[in-house]
């Protein structure tokens, strides 16, 4: 299972994919805005020839949240009754599956 970290004071979530043979590794950053009920996602993909680095992936994924313009890699509307952390994990798994194709 991949790891999820939450940063205290922020609804920022990070997840890195696990190592596996012939698998593209990714890092996804998620930021939840409770006012708009939108989960913004930023994605960093490590190409097969590169060495995976959590720090670089984290920096790229957070940068791709594009907080200044609101143009994140992906935006997810969060239903009122939804668990944001579970929705983030589900979105991570969908992105990871899509990028493995």
Image (cartoon, grey):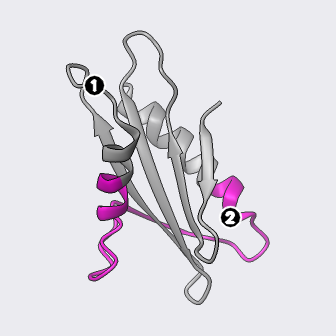
Q: Is residue 27 left or right of residue 82?
A: left
What residue is rendered at 62% in x and 48% in y?
4
Which one is earlier in the sequence, the residue at label 1 or at label 2? 1
Extreme-left residue of the structure: 49
- In magenta segment, residue 56: no
Vertical side of 61 occupied by 22: above or below: above
Q: Which residue is mark 2?
A: 84
- In magenta segment, residue 77: yes
Q: Give the residues drawn in magenta, as a range.
A: 59-87
Q: Is residue 10 left or right of residue 86?
A: left
- Report crowding for label 2: few under 14, some 14 to 19, many 20 or more residues within 10 A (C-alpha): many
Extreme-right residue of the structure: 81
Image location of residue 75, percent across then percent down: 44, 67
Image location of residue 77, percent across then percent down: 56, 71
Name the one closer to the observer, 96 or 12: 12
Q: Is residue 17 left or right of residue 72?
A: right
Q: Quadrant of the C terminus?
A: top left
State the SS at label 1: loop
- Report crowding for label 1: few under 14, some 14 to 19, many 20 or more residues within 10 A (C-alpha): few
Name the one closer to the observer, 21 or 83: 21
Vertical side of 47 occupied by 62: above or below: below
Image location of residue 96, percent across then percent down: 46, 35
Image location of residue 21, percent across then percent down: 42, 9
Q: Which residue is mark 1?
A: 51
Name the one closer to the observer, 87 or 50: 50
State the SS at label 2: helix
């Amino acid at each position: 299972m991949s790891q999820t970290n939450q940063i205290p004071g922020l609804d920022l979530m990070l997840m890195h994919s696990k190592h596996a043979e012939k698998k593209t590794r990714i890092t996804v950053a998620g930021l939840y805005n409770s006012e708009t009920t939108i989960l913004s996602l930023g994605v960093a993909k490590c190409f097969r020839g590169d060495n995976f680095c959590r720090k670089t992936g984290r920096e790229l994924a957070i940068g791709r949240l594009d907080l200044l313009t609101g143009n994140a890699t992906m935006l997810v509307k969060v239903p009122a009754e939804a668990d944001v952390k579970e929705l983030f994990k589900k979105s991570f798994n969908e992105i990871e599956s899509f990028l493995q194709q």
